[in-house]
Image: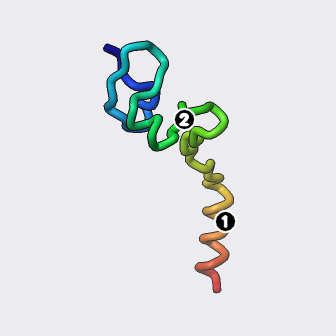
Amino acid sequence: MFSCVNQPRGCRGRVNQINTRCDSCRQLGLRKTSIFTAPSPYRRPSIDLPSLASLSNEYEQR
């Protein structure tokens, strides 16, 4: 027994052949995840600390 190809999407179905979908995924029309549809990992925005310090100083002067 192998895991359903949609296991990364949360499916817990079992199949007899590797890289196939379980009955539930076939009935629901769920497809294997793709690198083109997978969400990209969150990346923290870079912060320029000197520019923030200068903005803070300008705000305090007002």
Please name the residue that numbered disc 2 is placed on: 31
Q: Quadrant of residue 11?
A: top left
- Disc 2 marks a residue whose amino acid type is Arg
Q: Secondary structure at mark 2?
A: loop
- How many residues crowd mark 1 within 10 Å: few (<14), some (14–19), many (20+)? few
Q: Are marks 1 and 2 in contact (CB under 8 Å)?
A: no
Q: Quadrant of the C terminus?
A: bottom right
Is residue 61 placed above or below 53 in the rendered structure? Answer: below
* Position of residue 44 in the picture relative to residue 28 (left or right): right
Q: Quadrant of residue 12?
A: top left
Please name the residue that numbered disc 1 is placed on: 54
Q: In front: 33, or 38?
A: 33
* Position of residue 13 in the picture relative to residue 8 (left or right): left
Q: In front: 23, or 31?
A: 23
Is residue 14 placed above or below 54 in the rendered structure? Answer: above
- Disc 1 marks a residue whose amino acid type is Ser
Picture coordinates of residue 54, whole percent (x, y):
66, 65
Q: Secondary structure at mark 1?
A: helix
Is residue 17 placed above or below 9 in the rendered structure? Answer: above
Picture coordinates of residue 28, whole percent (x, y):
46, 43
Q: Earlier in the sequence, mark 1 or mark 2?
A: 2
Comparing labels 1 and 2, the label whose residue is closer to the camera: 2
Q: Residue at x 54, y 35 (%)?
A: 31
- How many residues crowd mark 2 within 10 Å: few (<14), some (14–19), many (20+)? few
Q: Quadrant of residue 16?
A: top left
Picture coordinates of residue 46, whole percent (x, y):
62, 48
Whole-Å distance between the Cαs marked 1 and 2? 51 Å
Is residue 52 placed above or below 60 in the rendered structure? Answer: above
In this picture the colour scheme is rainbow
